Image: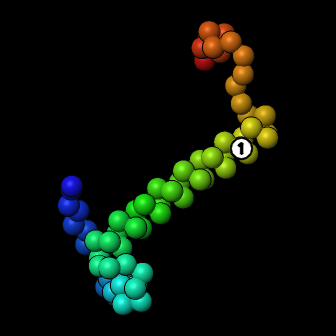
Amino acid sequence: MGILSVPLPAQLSEQIEELIKRGCAANKADLARRALEKYIEDQAVADVLNAERETREGKILSGDLDELAAKL
């Protein structure tokens, strides 16, 4: 397991402490892990939604892979 040390502005540090006091996470490390997991999940959802939007807009490639490769 890796360790990450990140300097934080005072306001963000205070907000982190408040979230821990409210029981959103057990400690700073737990909160950071949860935040990163949530960010990664949100990005994956955004990628799927973007792909769906592009499909609706007709921005997809279809056909023979060799022909597509030649076009690119």
User: Where is residue 65 shown, x and y percent of the image?
Assistant: 63, 14
- Name the quarter where the C terminus is drawn: top right
- Residue 51 appears left or right of 20: right
Q: Quadrant of residue 32?
A: bottom left
Task: Looking at the picture, tell me which residue is in the foreground, 53 or 26.
Answer: 26
Task: Looking at the picture, tell me which residue is in the foreground, 53 or 38.
Answer: 38
30 to 42, vertically: above or below: below
Q: Residue at x 73, y 45 (%)?
A: 53
Mark yes or no: residue 46 visible: yes
Q: Residue at x 70, y 25 (%)?
A: 61
Scheme by which the image is coloured: rainbow
Mark 1 Cα shell of 10 Å, populated few (<14), some (14-19), many (≥20):
some
Residue ID for mark 1:
52
40 to 52, vertically: above or below: below
- Name the quarter where the N terminus is drawn: bottom left
- Residue 22 appears left or right of 53: left
5 to 13, vertically: above or below: above
- Residue 34 appears left or right of 27: right
User: Where is residue 25 shown, x and y percent of the image?
Assistant: 37, 78
Helix or strand or loop: what does disc 1 sit on? helix
72 to 59, vertically: above or below: above
Q: Residue at x 66, y 42 (%)?
A: 51
In the image, what residue type sits under mark 1?
Glu
Q: Residue at x 68, y 12 (%)?
A: 64
User: Where is residue 48 shown, x and y percent of the image?
Assistant: 63, 46
Circle count: 1
Mark yes or no: residue 71 visible: no
User: Where is residue 54 shown, x and y percent of the image?
Assistant: 72, 40
